[in-house]
Image (cartoon, grey):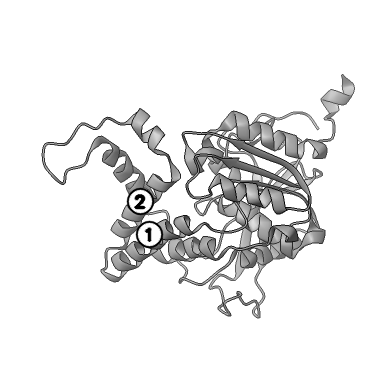
Amino acid sequence: MASQHWPIDEAPGRDVRAPIPKDFRLESGERLAAAEVVGRLHGRDDGPLVVVAGGISSGRFATRWWSWAVRAGGPVDLNRVRVLAFDLPPGRDDPGVTITTGDQARLLALLLDAIDAPRLEAFVGASYGGCIGLAFAAAFPQRIGRLVAISAAHRSHPAATAWRGVQRRLLAFARDCGREAEGVALARELAMITYRTPDEFALRFSSTPPAEAGAPYPVCDYLIARGAAYAEATSAARWIALSDSLDRHDVPPDAVRCPLSVVGFTSDRLVPIEDSRELAARAPNLTRLVEAPSIFGHDAFLKERELVGRALHDALSPLYAPSPREIAA
């Protein structure tokens, strides 16, 4: 197969769908409004299958939200592997449900069945996606070859639950007052503060006060812009469901028996490095623990290209067969 070079923000792919059985119930006993799980395949059809999943804002277009990592010649090399990413239910227009990372793992299993893939060779998960990967490995040990968990641990930290709990109450309050879009924007502003670090804010923004009390400071202008951009991307009900799902997440590390690589950042306030260390220490088949500082905090999995890219390459390189060009050389 000749090497291909696609634009960095997208690559050829095709959507795949799996019907959700009528008797499928979430752990809560509830049913999803959606009738199907939707995923997207990229890369070589005959390559080892790698599932890629990210934070609650991600979805099936992994070559967009993680364009530097999932691309031809990249750390998740589309010239060498087949990548499956999927949309995280509930959808934007669906009613809220109580859904767990274990439920998401079972929905992924439906999608794997639909594409006739009894086993995936690797699961690369970051943030919420890493939690789903841990849940999948625990629930389907025969269906996974290896797991890379980035900025994700086996449980939610109480401090992270506290921050997300405020966001959920803000979302519900705004929705009930008929000002849902404003609530989503404000919740996103609050979330961005937890994703990033004080060091980054100190480097990027001055403390110059506005002319009047109540007017935005320079850092507030940034947060307001991020909130406004997100207001149309999700609904309060969906965000509440997925945020709550993170806080229900609890997978015993000793249940994750596949080879496991853990990547954590010492500045991550949502997934403290101590939790990543505990996951690594208790996992029965740890391949590697990578920990590093970063001014980007929880968002380091998106921003620290060199370190995360190297960790991904090292974890996935056993899957990479020599390309025809390498064989010819």
The circle drawn on residue 70 is: none
Q: Amino acid at mark 1?
A: Gln
Q: Amino acid at mark 2?
A: Leu
Image coordinates of residue 305 in percent, x first then y, are 58, 31
The residue shown at (55%, 33%) is 304
Q: Is residue 119 left or right of residue 23?
A: right
Would you say the residues marked 2 and 1 are in contact, meaning their CB atoms lie under 8 Å apart?
A: yes
Q: Locate the N terminus and report the quarter of the image it occupies.
A: top right
Q: Mark 2 falls on what kind of element? A: helix
Tag count: 2
The residue shown at (48%, 59%) is 158
Image coordinates of residue 167 in percent, x first then y, are 37, 59
Looking at the image, is 61 positioned above or below residue 72?
below
Residue 105 sits in quarter = bottom right
Q: Mark 1 falls on what kind of element? A: helix
Q: What is the C-alpha distance between the residues marked 2 and 1?
A: 7 Å
The circle drawn on residue 167 is: 1
Looking at the image, is 156 positioned above or below residue 78?
below
Residue 18 sits in quarter = bottom right
Looking at the image, is 317 positioned above or below residue 128?
above
- Classify mark 1: residues with Cα within 10 Å, few (<14), some (14-19) or many (20+): many
- Classify mark 2: residues with Cα within 10 Å, few (<14), some (14-19) or many (20+): some
Q: Locate the C terminus and report the quarter of the image it occupies.
A: top right
Is residue 294 or residue 66 the one in the foreground?
294
Is residue 272 or residue 18 the one in the foreground?
272
Is residue 31 or residue 105 the one in the foreground?
105
Which of the marked residues, 2 or 1, is nearer the chain's N terminus?
1
Image coordinates of residue 265 in percent, x first then y, are 56, 40
Instruction: Point out the residue furthest to the top here.
Output: 329
Residue 318 at least partly seen = yes
The residue tagged 2 is 190
